[in-house]
Image (cartoon, grey):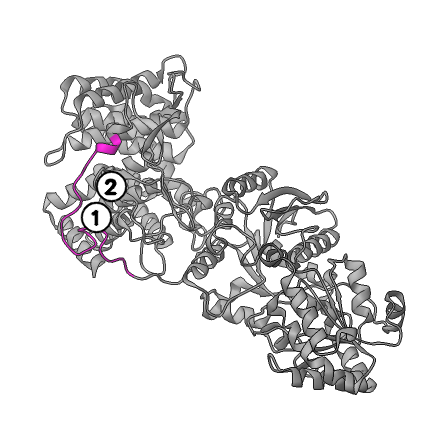
Amino acid sequence: MRPLQSVAFIGNHLPRRCGIATFTHDLHRAVAIAGKHLDTCVVAMSDANGVYAYPEPVRFEVRDAIAQDYRNAATFLNDAGVDVVSLQHEYGIFGGKAGADILELLSHLKMPVVTTLHTVLAAPSPTQRLVLDRIIATSEKMVVMSDMGRHFLRTVHKVPAGKISVIPHGIPAFPFVEPYRAKAKFGFDGKAVILTFGLLSPSKGIETVIDAMPSIIRSCPTAVYIVLGATHPNLVREQGEAYRESLVQRAHDLGVAGHVVFLNHFVDQATLLDYISMCDVYVTPYLNEAQMTSGTLAYSFGLGKAVVSTPYWHAQELLADGRGVLVPFGNPSAIGMEISSLLTDDVRRQALRRRAYATSRSMVWAETAKSYLSVLTAATEMDRLCDVPPRRPVNGHDALMRGSLALPELRTAHLLSMCDSTGLLQHAVHCVPDRSHGYCVDDNARALLLACSLGIENETQFPEKMTTRIAAFIQHAWNPDTRRFRNFMSYDRRWLETVGSEDSHGRALWALAACAAIDRDRLRRGWAVNLFRTALPQLETFTSPRAWAFTLLGLDAYCTVAPDDIGAGQLRRVLADRLLAMLRDNTVGSWVWFENVLAYDNARLPQALITTGQATGTRPYIEAGLTSLRWLISQQTGRSGRFRPVGSDSFGKILQAPAMFDQQPVEATATIAACLAAARVDSSTEWSAGAMRAFAWFLGANDLDVPLADVATGGCLDGLHADRPNLNMGAESTLSYLLALVDVRQRAHAGVAAGASVNASVVALSA
């Protein structure tokens, strides 16, 4: 494995006052020490009311209620070139419902994520389950601090065992000491000290110990119960100090006020360790079992304290086999009896202390850091897993999903609203065209493809004036000085580059070839032929496999118009052979693909080989296309059997299984076209079924159960984030939906056997 060079931690951080802040601080510090030359940093979560003087390791701050901060944090981490991220997850520290805002950050990270869960619920709410499932899907590994946490991940969230690591809560490396020195320091000489520490809130069960104090004092008159810790900030905001005052009053009413001491402080670690070392018995009287992790318990256990606790999940595991004492929830009598017994039985108390201390040596932060470094290092080498529970079938988004054979009508209202006198605008804010990003030849080429496709019988016509404007844009994109197409133009009609990408050049060629072959206007067909021939020779020097694929798809049309163009025919063979060689050279084990990464418009590569093989009668091209497409479909099928396009988080990740998000419409469209091309050369029904699964993704058969296409206007949302659709209707997404709809409608209208298979697939999808 390549040594880690940089790690970033996301979570609350000191001086913010909470257990997660302390944990993130301690974990970061321990890993930084253990990693020696490792570059580490922290992205700190801040609450709305907090202004914190963070130390130097905190290099970025996310305000939990500010959505843009999450995206900015992802940009910061990506730009910093961080190898791996360690996320500390707890319900309530992130914004949005069930902390969903953290998904915005995760969905844009380019590096693997290891998530530590400080709470795993046995019965999460639907929203909690959905959000955590998304976090799990985008995380390389999950870390929990107990076997119970692992059990719930396996049973509730269906996480594979190999994705889960159990690393106990870290503890300071503190010597085994007797309490008397610390007692003298804090003025508790001669007292039998019972201690509870942590942020004060009703769930901690302090009342139970206060209620037990009369019986404890009868057995041990010198007993004093110290409650160390500030009131939880959220409680202070809502109620002030009413809860603490009610506890003080309770002790007064029971006549034990002189034996109960409230220290309303959030102390630093050195002071905290002194307080723990002072106590004779540490008590955690939490009121319910749903406490997966307790840092206070881990610290006290690690300092060799005799611990009495209610049987919440963490305590059950840590104090089992005689390492501590468990008492029933909310039972003052039981808790009083056990504390009294330990305070009055020095031999038993000391035996319990030594057993706890010896057992806890594997939990010191130095050992915890080693475990984390091992998991973090492994995460940089592992495939990203996309294992989420199957989702329920979609019922009733539109006629298709209701079981009708009728496909949606093709409507172009939204697309036309994106066009102006220059051409097609790239982006939209919701459904409103966004002029700030101008135009690109990529989208105008797609629009020309659509306009030509609509010219085929049985489809709605694209307005002639818009086809002319789009063609004019492509013509203007041609730069005769560089012999290349430019791609991006600002709204004020300034080209932003002299040379566009190889892929945009290839896509322009594809659109020109389609125009040359099927445009209704004879003069425009002639224009397209001439510009295609002028721009084609550049392809021989290109290295992008997608540029080759787009050009091959264009040559499939062009060669029907100019079958005697020997140079075009030769280049066709050259490009197809290059794709074939790439597939052969990059196929490794179960990885059957043209590159050692996944990127965008993936299915166009096998589609290009299939169509070229069919046109030229070259069976090896067809077989390679079918094999690679079948592999791609296996990667794009979720456990529920639904289409799950390769998420943009996968782009550029070497030999990794696809990430789930963000899911882009262009991937669905490419898959539909490739499957229909496969159906023309192979009789298997898998291809028609694959096409319709991908089309149904637009209509709501996806991981979020939400339709992306607006069948009334023909607009399409820009894709799926981890927790919601992208509500903008840009040109690429809208054209992707319309091109896909044209493909499946024309296939169905053809009435051939493959078309009948498409209709059969519609029925199967709706069952």
Residue 550, compared with residue 208, is above or below; it is above
Q: Dot 2 corresponds to which residue? A: 740
Q: Amino acid at mark 2?
A: Ala
Indicate the position of residue 764 as horizontal and vertical percent values: 20, 59
Q: Dot 1 corresponds to which residue? A: 679
- Observer-side mark, 1 or 2, equals 2
Indicate the position of residue 756 as horizontal and vertical percent values: 13, 51
Question: With 667 as the anchor, is 525 left or right in this view?
Answer: left
User: Which residue of the protein is positioned furthest toward the front in this rendering?
Assistant: 253
Q: Is residue 690 magenta?
A: no
Instruction: Choose between 40 and 378: the one closer to the eye.
Output: 40
Q: Quadrant of the C terminus?
A: bottom left
Q: For mark 1, does the 10 Å Cα neighbourhood hold few (<14), some (14 to 19), or many (20 or more) residues? A: many
Q: Which residues are magenta?
A: 393-415
Residue 178 visible here: yes
Instruction: Choose between 327 and 635: the one closer to the eye.
Output: 327
Residue 506 visible here: no
Residue 434, compared with residue 48, is above or below; it is above
Q: Is residue 414 magenta?
A: yes
- Mark 1: which secondary structure? helix
Q: Main secondary structure of the magenta part?
A: loop
- Distance between mark 1 and mark 2 Cα atoms: 15 Å
Indicate the position of residue 105 as horizontal and vertical percent values: 51, 46
Question: With 502 as the anchor, is 230 left or right in this view?
Answer: right
